[in-house]
Image (spheres, grey):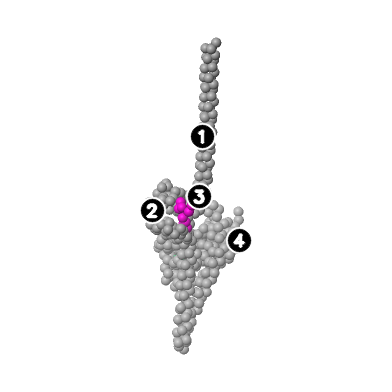
């Protein structure tokens, strides 16, 4: 009996042992699986948060650079890489290794010692001028220990260019106004000093004064027109304008100007109608024809012509057979106050604003303006307008 009971007891112990072991192992595996699942979820959350952070940083217009406590790059967003034209991985590099800009490396040091640097203007040492505004601050944790540095970069290049254009414009305007004004002043003084007693001299001086006063008047009118066009204050009164009669009127008005030079004016426009503001269009054509007469050759021909182009737009041209425009000046003649030959333009009474006004008016109509020329072979100015009829 005992041996039997012993065997049963041993068997039972073995079974219980294996049962417990199996249960224990099963539970351990279950716990392990749960742990792994938890870790996986945590990792997923971290990866998602990181990806979200990356998307956020990359959608910023400002360049962002984060440095760790060892002043090595921890993060650089897309805008930052674009600003500096970088394509490689920057993580782990110092500012100097990544960018080779001494001034920026020095700025990082200043932030380390001073805590922050605001509105710092940085000019990049490149061929094409680039300006950045940098705001930088040290990052500290709750215990007040330095964790790193954050730098935010804003592209100032366009703003700087606009500022320079404005300064140049003011300088140009002052110069343009001063020239006729000082002439007027000079001749008035000479007249007052006694020249008025000689009627012949007085008449000559008064004519010079009159010419320069008209020049001032013209300049101010052109400046006001440019300013109104640029600020969008001018609203166009668009209506179908038959082009041939308009050109006919302009050529007749300008005919008197050609007398001394004996220039032939030809209206070659077909019967076309454009959707335009008649007064503004007249200003465009008059400026172009006037230039063609002024800068064309004596006894030459000025032709106004046009066609409907492939995109159904009206293309108008004004052609002369004068000395033409050098290729390097072709794009620049539409700039305010740009003249190929300053002395010649002034002597002809030009303000240097005519073509700039032409460009603005044409662009306000949704058109384009351009010039083709070869030295010695004349110049042809083209512009497009929307058609006045379907
Ligand atoms: P301006 O008052 O000096 O005529 P514009 O803006 O009308 O000013 O023209 C700018 C410059 O473009 C002129 O000074 C001249 O040098 C050049 N230009 C314009 N039209 C012609 C042309 N038909 N032939 C040659 N040069 C021209």
Q: Looking at the image, tell me whether mark 2 or mark 4 is earlier in sequence order.
A: 2
- Residue mark closest to the camera, 2 vs 1: 1
Few, some or many residues within 10 Å of mark 2 (<14, 14–19, 20+)? some
Give the residue at mark 4: 238
Judging depth in this view, the residue of 345 and 114 nearest the camera is: 114
Q: CA distance from mark 1 to mark 4?
A: 73 Å
Q: Residue at x 41, y 50 (%)?
A: 70
Q: Residue at x 43, y 53 (%)?
A: 84
Q: Residue at x 48, y 74 (%)?
A: 177
Give the residue at mark 1: 36
Few, some or many residues within 10 Å of mark 1 (<14, 14–19, 20+)? few
Q: Looking at the image, tell me whether mark 2 or mark 1 is earlier in sequence order.
A: 1
Give the residue at mark 3: 57
**Left or right of 178 in this view: 247:** right
Contact check, label 1 and label 4, Cβ < 8 Å: no
Secondary structure at badge 1 equals: helix
Q: What type of secondary structure mainly makes up the magenta span?
A: strand
Q: CA distance from mark 4 to mark 3?
A: 46 Å
Contact check, label 2 and label 1, Cβ < 8 Å: no
Q: Looking at the image, tell me whether mark 4 or mark 3 is earlier in sequence order.
A: 3
Few, some or many residues within 10 Å of mark 4 (<14, 14–19, 20+)? some
Q: Position of residue 75 (x, y in %)?
A: 46, 49
Q: Which residues are magenta?
A: 133-147
- Residue mark closest to the camera, 2 vs 4: 2
Residue 135 included in the magenta stretch of the image: yes
């Amino acid at each position: 009996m005992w041996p039997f009971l012993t065997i049963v007891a041993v068997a039972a112990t073995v079974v219980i042992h294996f049962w417990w072991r199996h249960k224990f192992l099963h539970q351990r595996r279950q716990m392990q699986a749960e742990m792994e699942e938890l870790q996986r979820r945590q990792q997923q959350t971290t990866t998602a948060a990181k990806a979200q952070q990356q998307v956020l940083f990359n959608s910023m217009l400002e360049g962002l650079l984060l440095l760790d406590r060892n002043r090595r790059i921890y993060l650089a967003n897309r805008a930052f890489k674009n600003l500096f034209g970088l394509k490689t991985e920057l993580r782990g590099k110092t500012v100097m290794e990544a960018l080779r800009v001494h001034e920026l490396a020095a700025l990082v040091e200043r932030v380390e010692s001073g805590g922050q640097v605001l509105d710092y203007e940085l000019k990049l040492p490149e061929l094409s001028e680039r300006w950045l505004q940098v705001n930088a601050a040290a990052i500290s944790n709750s215990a007040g220990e330095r964790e790193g540095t954050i730098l935010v970069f804003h592209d100032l290049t366009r703003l700087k260019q606009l500022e320079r254009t404005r300064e140049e414009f003011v300088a140009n305007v002052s110069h343009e106004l001063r020239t006729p004004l000082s002439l007027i002043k000079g001749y008035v003084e000479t007249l007052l000093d006694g020249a008025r007693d000689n009627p012949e001299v007085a008449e000559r001086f008064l004519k010079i004064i009159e010419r320069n006063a008209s020049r001032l008047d013209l300049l101010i009118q052109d400046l006001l027109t440019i300013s109104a066009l640029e600020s969008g204050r001018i609203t166009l009164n668009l209506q179908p304008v038959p082009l041939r009669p308009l050109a006919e009127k302009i050529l007749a008005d300008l005919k008197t100007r050609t007398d001394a030079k004996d220039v032939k004016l030809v209206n070659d426009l077909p019967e076309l109608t454009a959707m335009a503001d008649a007064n503004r269009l007249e200003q465009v054509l008059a400026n172009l024809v006037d230039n063609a007469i002024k800068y064309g050759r004596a006894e030459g021909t000025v032709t106004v012509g046009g066609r409907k182009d492939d995109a159904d737009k009206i293309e108008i041209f004004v052609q002369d057979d004068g000395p033409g425009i050098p290729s390097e000046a072709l794009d620049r003649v539409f700039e305010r106050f740009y003249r190929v030959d300053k002395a010649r333009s002034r002597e002809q009474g030009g303000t240097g604003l005519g073509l700039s006004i032409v460009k603005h008016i044409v662009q306000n109509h949704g058109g384009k303006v351009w010039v083709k020329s070869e030295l010695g072979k004349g110049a042809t100015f083209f512009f497009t307008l929307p058609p006045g009829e379907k």
